[in-house]
Image (spheres, rainbow, N blue to C red):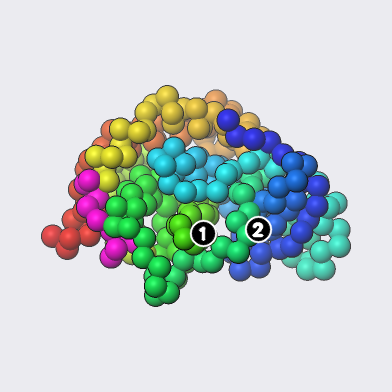
Amino acid sequence: MIRHVTATRYVTPLREGGSLPAVVEADDDGLYVAKFRGAGHGVKALVAELIAGEIGRALGLLVPEIVLVDFDPRLAAAEPDQEIRELLQRSSGVNVGLDFLPGALSFDPAAGFKPPPELCAAVVWFDSFVTNVDRDVRNTNMLVWHGRLWLIDHGSALYIHHTWKDVAAHAVKPMAAIKSHVLMPMAGSILEADDRLAPMLTSELLGSIIDSVPDEWLAEGDGLADPAAHRAAYRDYLERRLAVHRQLAEEAERVRTGA
């Protein structure tokens, strides 16, 4: 169950993020990194953040808790940056938030922290499954917090939903960008990761995650008439991908070994 909170204070923008997220305080007294529907790819980035992030959490990977954040743009009235103010004005309603990890540092493969090979392989497998193309050396989208690796920023995953074209062919296709994955050089066997992780994902689990997406993020468009049609499209795509998980893992392993 995804918790629902209401933003009570706009704390500060995070200008290093391409989508201009911000730290907000909510009515549960928690701090969250809010991703706004008015930015960049709009609500589709929020859908990807929620679905991919919750899949990662179901696989036992460290993803900060994901919440739904009601945001009143009047909270940011004092924000001096016009671009950010306009973004927030477009973001009234339900947005997505990730639990804020105070003091966390961006993962840098050159900084000395080396995640275990099994964990690296699991992250590569996960990103391949959800087609997350945004975890390379330039933009690792991972944090190191209390000596552990945390995964953030999944808004670029599930990019099929920007068109919903050729779904059947796309669903069985290995992700070409996996070759530039920042953890690939440190990864252990992707096939062993597949043995561990694939059984954790079921149709029922995927369906429950997809059902947690707010209806208002699933508006008519792309040939899909209503939220139910959108949910069916996401479920069909992910189930098709899960059905060929071994082939996807074999291609990732071929990239890893240079075979």
Q: Which residue is most to the bottom? A: 110
Quick one: label 2 or label 1, which is nearer the N terminus? 2
The residue sitting at 63% across, 31% down in the picture is 215
Residue 249 shown left or right of residue 28 in the figure: left
Q: Residue furthest left?
A: 259
Which residue is more in the foreground, 130 or 192? Answer: 192
**Closer to the camera, 38 or 8?**
8
Neighbour tally class for label 2: few under 14, some 14-19, many 20 plus, Cα within 10 Å: many
Disc 2 designates what residue?
21
Residue mark closest to the camera, 2 vs 1: 1
Along the line of sight, the residue nearer the viewer: 82 or 8 = 8
Q: Are marks 2 and 1 in contact (CB under 8 Å)?
A: no
Across and down, in percent, residue 14 comes to 66, 64
The residue under the point 64% across, 45% down is 96
Check if residue 74 falls in the magenta segment. Answer: no
- Looking at the image, is 173 positioned above or below residue 145? above
Q: Which residues are magenta?
A: 183-192
Q: Residue at x 28, y 40 (%)?
A: 196
Residue 86: horizontal and vertical position, in percent? 77, 59
Where, by quadrant of the figure, is residue 22 drawn? bottom right
The kind of secondary structure element at disc 2 is: loop
The main secondary structure of the magenta stretch is helix
User: Given the image, on which type of amino acid does mark 1 rest?
Assistant: His
Q: Is residue 249 visible?
A: no
The secondary element bearing badge 1 is classed as: loop
Q: Which residue is mark 1?
A: 146
